[in-house]
Amino acid sequence: MNLSLSDLEKNFQEVEPGLTDREAIEEANRCLYCYDAPCIKACPTGIDIPAFIKKIASGNLKGSAKTIMLSNPVGASCARVCPTEELCEGACVLNHSTKPIMIGKLQRYATDWAIRNEEVLFEAGKKNGKTVAVVGGGPAGLSAARELARMGYTVTIFEAEKEAGGLNTYGIVSFRLPQKISFWEVNQVKGLGVQIRTNTKVGKDISAKELLDDYDAVVLAVGMGKVPMLGIEGEDLDGVYDAIEFIKETKTNPLTDKLVGKRVVVIGAGNTAIDGATCSVRLGAENVKILYRRTKEEMTAYDFEYEFAKQDGVEFRWLTAPKRIIGDENGKVTHIECVRMKLGEPDADGRRRPVPIEGSEFTMRVDVVIKAIGQTRHLDLIQEFGLEHDDGVVKVNPENYQTSNQKVFACGDVIFAKGQGEAMVVTAAQQGKEAAYAIHQYLTKAVSETA
Amino acid sequence: MSYQEFLAERDKIDYLIQQGYYIKNVRENLSGAFVEFELKMPDSSEKKDTTQILHIQNADARKYFSSLLIRQMKQAK
Amino acid sequence: MADLSINLAGIKSPNPFWLASAPPTNSGYQVQRAFEAGWGGAVWKTLGEPILNVSSRFAAVSFNGQRVMGFNNIELITDRPLEVNLKEIYETKKRFPDRAVVASLMVEPKREKWHEIVKRVEDVGVDGLELNFGCPHGMAERGMGSASGQVPELVEKQTYWVKEVAQTPVIVKLTPNITDITATAEAAVQGGADAISMINTINSLMGVDLDTWNTIPHVSGKGAHGGYCGPAVKPIALNMVAECARHPRIHVPISGIGGISSWKDAVEFMLMGATGVQVCTAVMHHGFRIIEDMIEGLNHYLDEKGIASVMDIVGKSVHKYSNWGGLDLNYKVVARINTDVCINCNKCYISCEDASHQCIDRLTDENGKEYLKVREEDCVGCNLCSIVCPVDGAIDMVEIPSEHPPMTWNERQAAISGLNSCNVDVK
Ligand SMILES: Cc1cc2nc3c(=O)[nH]c(=O)nc-3n(C[C@H](O)[C@H](O)[C@H](O)COP(=O)(O)OP(=O)(O)OC[C@H]3O[C@@H](n4cnc5c(N)ncnc54)[C@H](O)[C@@H]3O)c2cc1C
Ligand SMILES: Cc1cc2nc3c(=O)[nH]c(=O)nc-3n(C[C@H](O)[C@H](O)[C@H](O)COP(=O)(O)O)c2cc1C
Ligand code: SF4
Ligand code: SF4
Ligand code: SF4
């Protein structure tokens, strides 16, 4: 295969086209405008879906975008990455009569309009003199900041990376979510006067204590960390990558041809594995396999992602676990040794535990191994804040996201417990909003108690 | 089609105007318009008829002579 | 944020959207729910001697799978005693003092009947009165509604009786079931109306059942004509509003009604001379909640245009509405097909070929691909092709500059007759 870099770049353009004006109008007019609609209840952020669709039909696109973004500060990203068939579209009443409304695509149509027209949709509330520090500028942090700013708080986001947006900016592949969408959402938040201090890692560039001392409240929204170690031999060979780092590379640096013609295996079967695999295909890899130690049933990636990967030509090897990565004398990956698995008794999270079949080991020739078996936790930072946690999952009061330190509220992936399927942008956004409201209650209550 | 009819009738009108005629009278009925042209200056050589009548049938040609007529009346003022 | 408040003949409301007198304004419960949702005003379901209704009252036409393109009813005015309505009007006005509450009235064409109801209604504090001279069914058979609304003298006389005692502004609601609505509108003005509203519903029979041969709807196997409303009647209503707005002797404000479903419809009515609008069918279809988009859409529209107050758009298009004889005969548009956008359905071709001027050619390019081209010199600019074309942007109607100055039919006829008459003078 002869792929030029510009071919690769084309591969990284957004795959799904947006709706045309006519498609959008026809689809919008198909929506029944249900009352107390089930689609609203199925949206974790509770977007008033019939209202925003009606506004597309009536030509009030600004209003439509506002309705979406009001409930979901990262609504433009969600229009692209939400597993809609499991959420809003899955709940659409038309599933029972014709076919569900393409809610995600309509949401994208309205928000694309706002992006194109550079609309500023919200205003900051009148300053109330109180300050909140938000640690992490991903979907959860941005949503918390947006709502706090609308209520009049002076908000500062501390973001370790060069740009805010979290995994929307760096983690979800460009051909599903272009960076400019995430940047627009970041700018909407900035437009409310929220200060975003990028390249500022809490725990390193500024201490947790400083934040606790200087701000009235703190939102901890640092998400999760990098991919953990597999704990097998050969993990540090040249050609072994962390899926999240690997994807981030494609979103930050110019694409390279280092994967052209290569054989790739991806280990894991969640969103990250799929994104790592499709990324590899689009970087010109000759063959891409996903190895998963359980079966398709236990896989956490959404159906649409699985379909998407299959269409990209990704192969799946179920009930297969890596045992050892083998390299040549130069330290480069050449083979991977795997073992076949079978499913045993269910374990703590209810999924059946895979157990190796003895003597079933085999090796495959590979050039690249991408690890995508989940994400580590920001344990150090959590400890620096002195918060109670479960194995790195920050403990919160489920009512209001308050942590063991009453001043600190945590939301998003940082409180995402293991074994619940996949974390979602949309839940992170909703938790961010709710944390903001809880902080408001906490701080106004504090005032009325002292007053 | 109808454009060709228009061109043919317009040419006839233009020809008479070039020859020094002006629109003297217009009669319209079910058959279209009968436009009477008259020479501005009587032709001393008497080669030209003093009046000529064109039967204008095409709709665009009927708009056309009307525009010429309005211009002619404006110029006369 | 633009100022959306209006003042219609002295009746003020925070936005131009009122509920029309109809089932949504039947009770205090409903009108208060509407006001909570944001409606600027409501014309109460027509008051009069409580009537009896039949069961099976409405029907609608669907068009290409879209429900309620047109809507029809054989419902009469309120079936509740006046006292009950008045009590609820009073309570509603007390809870929402900033909204317009207008009482719609219909009684027999007798002076004392009008005097009585006007006084009783005004006692509870309504902001205005609307005289229902429009209902086309049922009440008309008893000499009320459109039966009196079709006779200019009766409109004038009854309006006059009302004005004899009314303290609040009087709106006369006109029926569209008449050849020339300006005749009754002018009669209302003569009678002293402070404003007019239009349209009420249009006589209609929605359909006949192919199996039972019953009318749709039917009441125990029999039907009667109903009143038609909803999106289908909008062009009819808009014309009637525009005709009244440009009529020199009809100088009172107009409340526009008929098929208004969105903020865009409202803008059109206001540009054509309505000071505010009333809505019925759209609310019957979707509920009071549509008001949110109506207000927001109107606001965004005005902001985008840099217009400070919605009152500033009232009537801005009226001067553009004229008689046919005032249109420029030398203005010319032609159709132009954008081959790159066209999907080759040939719908434009067949409509021009069979129903217009046979000026679209079917051609083949050097690669053997079929395409369509308009012979612009033969195109009369009727718009038909662009109307049937299913693809946005495939057909543009483009203006062709004329070599002649504008010429209307009236100017042309004046020129020809001027010419001919001055010839006569000479002879
Ligand atoms: C490859 C991949 C694909 C995914 N695909 C989907 C999908 O299709 N649909 C979907 O709904 N979800 C998807 N997800 C999940 C989704 O991205 C997350 O659930 C979501 O981004 C969580 O938001 P968050 O704000 O909690 O965390 P993050 O997005 O991780 O943001 C955390 C932010 O905190 C910053 N930060 C971390 N530590 C510090 C520190 N010490 N100081 C300052 N800043 C710090 C980080 O730089 C980052 O910007 C995917 C995830 C991955 C990894
Ligand atoms: C079921 C129904 C009942 C109506 N009753 C009244 C009425 O009592 N008084 C009245 O003035 N108009 C009545 N109307 C007419 C409406 O007020 C309005 O003029 C008409 O429906 C056109 O507006 P629309 O297209 O928004 O529905 C009624 C309409 C409907 C559909
Ligand atoms: S459930 Fe479906 S049809 Fe009903 S409002 Fe939601 S998207 Fe529209
Ligand atoms: S505008 Fe009318 S006449 Fe011209 S091409 Fe279209 S259909 Fe034919
Ligand atoms: S109707 Fe429109 S799409 Fe169809 S052939 Fe004509 S121009 Fe093309």
Image (cartoon, rainbow, N blue to C red):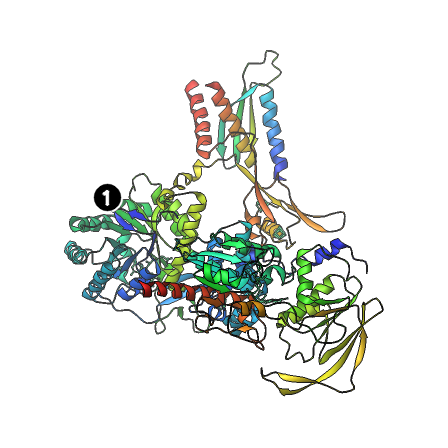
Name of the residue lying farthest toward the top: B44
Of residues A445 and C147, the one nearer the viewer is: A445
Q: Is residue A221 left or right of residue C189?
A: right
Three-letter code, disc 1: Gln
* Residue A320 screen position, x and y as percent: 73, 79
**Residue found at x 47% / y 58%:** A146
Which quarter of the rendering shows the N terminus of chain B? Answer: top right
Q: Is residue C88 above or below residue B67?
A: below
Quarter of image, ligand 2: bottom left
Q: Is residue C263 above or below residue A411?
A: above
* Residue A71 screen position, x and y as percent: 47, 62
Q: Is residue C308 above or below residue A7?
A: above
Q: Within 10 Å of the Cα at label 1, are there few (<14), some (14-19), or many (20+) other Cα atoms?
A: some
**Residue found at x 81% / y 77%:** A363
Q: Secondary structure at mark 1?
A: helix
Q: Which residue is mark 1?
A: C190
Can you tell which quarter of the image residue A200 is in? bottom right
Q: Is residue B44 left or right of residue C174?
A: right
* Residue C281 screen position, x and y as percent: 38, 60
* Residue A160 screen position, x and y as percent: 58, 59
Of residues A65 and C394, the one nearer the viewer is: A65
Q: Is residue B18 above or below residue C171?
A: above
Mark yes or no: residue A295 visible.
yes
Which quarter of the rendering shows the C terminus of chain B? Answer: top left
Q: Is the CB of mark 1 within 8 Å of ligand 2?
A: no
Q: How many marks?
A: 1
Chain for disc number 1: C
Mark yes or no: residue A33 visible.
no
